[in-house]
Structures are given as structure tokens and as C-alpha cells.
Image: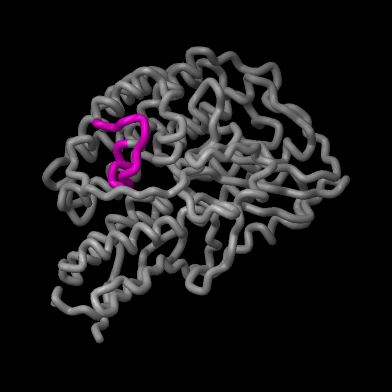
């Protein structure tokens, strides 16, 4: 088995990789010849759906792209439309948006850590199997996730596809009494988040490192979530309006998702590891302390340690939510008017999986004439395939079953979509 020099690992059903995808690995004469993360889900046409719609509609429409990170789509859409219309929301509304986004970071990161990725490190096939032996751990994760969901529901109206978000702000601002019970829950959640960092820091991380250029939003005085400008580890710095000048997308034969690369520079990576590497110094002191105790330095280049970074970011999001609730005063009006005008607008925020870019063009009546959405997974695909190539090359001594399992875990390092990182698949192996 493992001594064969020609091998084809063909995994036809990577369940829910931003929909549907597969993994294809070809080894010829002992050399990794081809690695493809294939995304074959039929196009969803959201950008086409948006054409002809009013400028107030993108937050509700784009939220349906993802049931796990709808706030990211709503916030990027609002930012782009408001940019086009020349509107800046007041600080109180901006703070409420950041608080809502903290809820999404908490629930999304915790879902990935506890239910999708931790079983890989502990030798379990699923979180259900883990729960049979360590029910306490899974219950801690579910409790922490529920706190994030409840925070989203309190502000957004519901945890999945929130309905309270609108261009210019919210339909209704919560009363302080609505958030007070959550503040107490978040205190408990902070202890759970710190315990999570200590737990995942004890996992066994393969010694694998990558050298991809990393990209993330940054702000001068806080960890970027819902706003910022773009920086890379290669020294690029540019505003969100220049995103399309620096990031080029292309169609590849094996994927219905576009591949992105930095113009003149090549593949890159966005997501928690990139955010951490580019913004480590802007974490709260407690989050930095937790990171240091977990063995993370100022940068992270091992994708397996992404689970630790997500745990650290969860600590930050819980802390930030507490701070925002403590400082919360309901805005005098929940939203500002955003009158339409013929213009183009650009918006980017940090979804749990990385930078999410939106651009809209609209006419003087506020009807959208074009839209472009660049999700994190599309930006990361080339880097993931490159990592898989090197990953497989270093493990050709493994049998097909073990190699496939480890490739799946390697893909889950990047959390290509929350549902994408589930345990997949029927494996078919062809040998020549």
C-alpha cells in the first residue's frame, strides 16, 4: 500500500465546503503531482439577485448567504452602501454593531473549536463521540456558544439571519435592561473561554508551517472586527476602496468558487491566524496573556494552531462584549437616514473566517446596478491547496485511509466554512 509510487486519492464529497466540494490528490512516481480542493456547488447567483434591488435590501439578502456568519455579510453590506451614500453612522450605532459582531465571533469560533475541530486532535470521529467520554467539555462548549447566540438574538432579533439590522443602523435599539442579563452570562463565558484556551493549547500540533502572505483589516487602537484598513505581512497597506486593485480573482476549472491572489504577489491567507499575526499587539491584555500562556508568540505560522488562535479571539470577543455593554447607552435614534445617490461603495469587515469584501454600484434612485462579494474561503483556496501539496508530500508513507483522514484535518485547520469543517465523506481510492 504505502510503498506504491502512483496513487490517486479522490474524495468526491467534502460535505459543505461553502456548499459542496471534494478533494483530489494525485501522486505519480512518488511525487505529488496534483492537489485540488474542488468546489462544485452550483453558483448561487447572489450578486445577480442584488441587481435591480433597492439600496436598503443587501443586508437582508446577503445575510442568507451563510447561516453561521450572517452578521458579517450584513455589516459588510451596510458599510459598502453607507460608503456609497456618504453616510457615517454615529459612534453609538457603530458600537452596537461591534457588540452584535462579538456575538457572532463567539458562537462561530466556539462551534468550530468544540464541535468540528477538537475531535480531530483527540482521536474522535465527531463531537458526539467526544461527548460520550467527555460530556463536560462538550457542554462547556455548547454553553459558551449559546451565550454568543443569545447576544446576537438580543441585538439582531434572532440568532440566525438577524432581522434587526438595516442600512444606517438598526430598526430597534435594545434597552440597557435587555443586555443586563447577558452581561452576567458573559462573565461566566469569560471563564469558559479562558478554560478553552488552556484546553486546546494542550493538543498535539504537527510541526507544519507555511509562508503565505497574510491579509487582514487593522485599526490603530483596537483589534479590527467591523471596520479598518487592509494590511498584509508583506508590507502592503491600502484602504478598502483599493481592494479590487490589489486582489484579483480568477476562475479555475475545478471550482465554482473563484480563486483570489494578490496582484503581482500570488496566494495569500486571511482569517484568524492572519488577524492574530497582523494585530496581536492590539488584543486586550488578558487575551495576550492567554495567548502567551498557550505558547503563541507574536505571530502564528502553524495552521494547526489556528484552533488556539480562535480560542484567544473568543476571549477577546467576550471581553469586548462586556466592555461594550458596560458602556452602552441607547442611541437617540436607532438608525440614520441613508438617502441614495448614484455612486459606488466599498465595505469590508472581519468575518470569523477572514476579511469579507463587498462592493455595490447604484443609480440615483438607489437601485443597485452591480455587486461584488469576495468571501474569505475564496481568498484562501489557493493557499490551502499549496499547504495540502506540501502536507501530502511529507506523509506519503501513510496508507490511503490515514492520509485521507489527515488531509481532512488539514483542511479543517482553515475552517473554510463552519459547516464545511464537519467530518466528511465517502472515500474512493484509485491506484495505477
- Residue furthest out toward the bottom: 432
Image location of residue 201, percent across then percent down: 22, 35
State the quadrant of the C terminus.
bottom left
Give the x, y percent position of residue 104: 46, 37
In the displayed structure, does residue 334 sit left or right of residue 40?
right
The vertical placement of 383 against 311, above or below, is below
Which quadrant: the N terminus? bottom left
Check the image and report above or below for 382 versus 188. below
Q: Residue at 41% of width from left, 28% of height from top?
A: 280
On screen, residue 348 above or below 50: above
Nearest the viewer among 57 and 154 is 57
Q: Quadrant of residue 149?
A: top left
Q: Is residue 350 visible?
A: no
Q: Position of residue 173 (x, y in %)?
A: 61, 24
Q: Residue at x 76, y 30 (%)?
A: 87
User: Which is more toward the observer, 242 or 422?
Assistant: 242
> Looking at the picture, does residue 146 appear above or below residue 48?
above
Tell me if residue 363 is in the magenta stretch. Answer: no
Q: Is residue 296 magenta?
A: yes
Q: Is residue 425 visible?
A: yes
Residue 140, by quadrant, is: top left
Residue at x 68%, y 43% (from the top left corner)? 242
Q: Residue at x 24, y 31 (%)?
A: 295
For the record, the magenta segment spans 295-308
Q: How many marks?
A: 0
User: Which color mode does the image show?
Assistant: one colour
Left/right of residue 9 with respect to residue 372 in the rendered view: left
- Residue 125 location in percent, x, y? 20, 56
Q: Residue extending furthest right?
A: 364
- Residue 55, located in which quarter of the rendered image? top right
Amino acid at each position: 500500500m504505502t510503498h506504491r509510487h502512483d496513487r490517486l486519492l479522490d474524495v468526491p464529497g467534502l460535505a459543505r465546503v461553502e456548499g459542496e466540494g471534494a478533494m483530489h490528490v494525485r501522486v505519480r512516481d512518488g511525487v505529488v503531482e496534483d492537489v485540488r480542493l474542488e468546489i462544485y456547488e452550483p453558483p448561487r447567483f447572489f450578486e445577480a439577485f442584488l441587481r435591480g434591488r433597492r439600496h436598503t435590501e443587501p443586508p437582508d439578502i446577503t445575510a442568507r448567504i451563510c447561516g453561521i456568519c450572517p452578521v458579517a455579510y450584513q455589516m459588510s453590506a451596510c458599510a459598502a452602501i453607507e460608503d456609497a451614500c456618504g453616510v457615517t453612522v454615529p459612534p453609538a450605532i457603530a458600537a452596537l454593531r461591534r457588540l452584535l459582531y462579538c456575538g457572532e465571533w463567539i458562537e462561530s469560533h466556539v462551534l468550530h473549536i468544540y464541535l468540528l475541530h477538537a475531535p480531530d486532535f483527540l482521536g474522535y470521529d465527531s463531537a458526539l463521540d467526544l461527548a460520550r467520554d467527555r460530556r463536560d467539555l462538550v457542554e462547556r462548549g455548547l454553553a459558551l456558544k449559546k451565550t454568543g447566540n443569545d447576544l446576537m438574538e438580543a441585538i439582531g432579533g434572532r440568532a440566525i439571519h438577524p432581522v434587526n439590522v438595516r442600512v444606517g443602523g438598526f430598526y430597534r435599539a435594545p434597552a440597557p435592561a435587555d443586555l443586563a442579563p447577558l452581561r452576567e452570562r458573559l462573565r461566566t463565558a469569560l471563564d469558559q473561554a479562558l478554560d478553552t484556551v488552556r484546553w486546546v493549547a494542550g493538543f498535539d500540533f504537527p510541526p507544519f508551517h507555511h509562508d503565505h502572505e497574510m491579509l487582514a483589516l487593522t485599526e490603530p487602537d483596537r483589534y479590527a472586527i467591523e471596520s479598518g484598513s487592509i494590511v498584509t505581512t508583506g508590507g502592503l497597506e491600502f484602504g478598502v476602496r483599493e481592494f479590487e486593485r490589489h486582489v484579483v480573482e480568477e476562475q479555475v476549472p475545478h471550482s465554482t468558487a473563484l480563486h483570489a491572489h494578490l496582484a503581482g504577489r500570488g496566494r495569500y491567507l486571511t482569517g484568524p491566524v492572519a488577524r492574530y499575526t497582523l494585530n496581536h499587539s492590539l488584543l486586550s491584555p488578558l487575551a495576550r496573556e492567554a495567548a502567551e500562556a498557550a505558547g503563541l508568540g507574536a505571530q502564528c505560522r502553524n495552521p494547526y494552531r489556528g484552533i488556539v488562535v480562535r480560542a484567544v479571539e473568543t476571549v477577546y470577543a467576550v471581553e469586548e462584549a462586556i466592555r461594550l455593554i458596560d458602556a452602552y447607552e441607547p442611541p437617540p435614534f436607532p438608525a440614520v437616514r441613508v438617502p441614495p445617490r448614484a455612486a459606488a461603495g466599498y465595505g469590508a469587515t472581519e468575518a470569523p473566517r477572514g476579511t469579507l469584501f463587498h462592493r455595490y454600484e447604484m443609480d440615483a434612485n438607489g437601485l443597485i446596478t452591480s455587486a461584488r462579494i469576495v468571501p474569505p474561503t475564496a481568498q484562501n483556496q489557493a493557499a490551502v491547496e499549496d499547504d495540502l501539496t506540501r502536507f501530502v508530500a511529507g506523509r506519503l508513507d501513510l496508507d490511503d485511509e490515514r492520509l485521507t483522514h489527515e488531509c481532512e484535518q488539514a483542511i479543517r485547520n482553515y475552517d473554510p466554512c463552519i459547516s464545511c469543517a464537519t467530518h466528511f465523506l465517502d472515500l474512493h481510492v484509485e491506484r495505477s
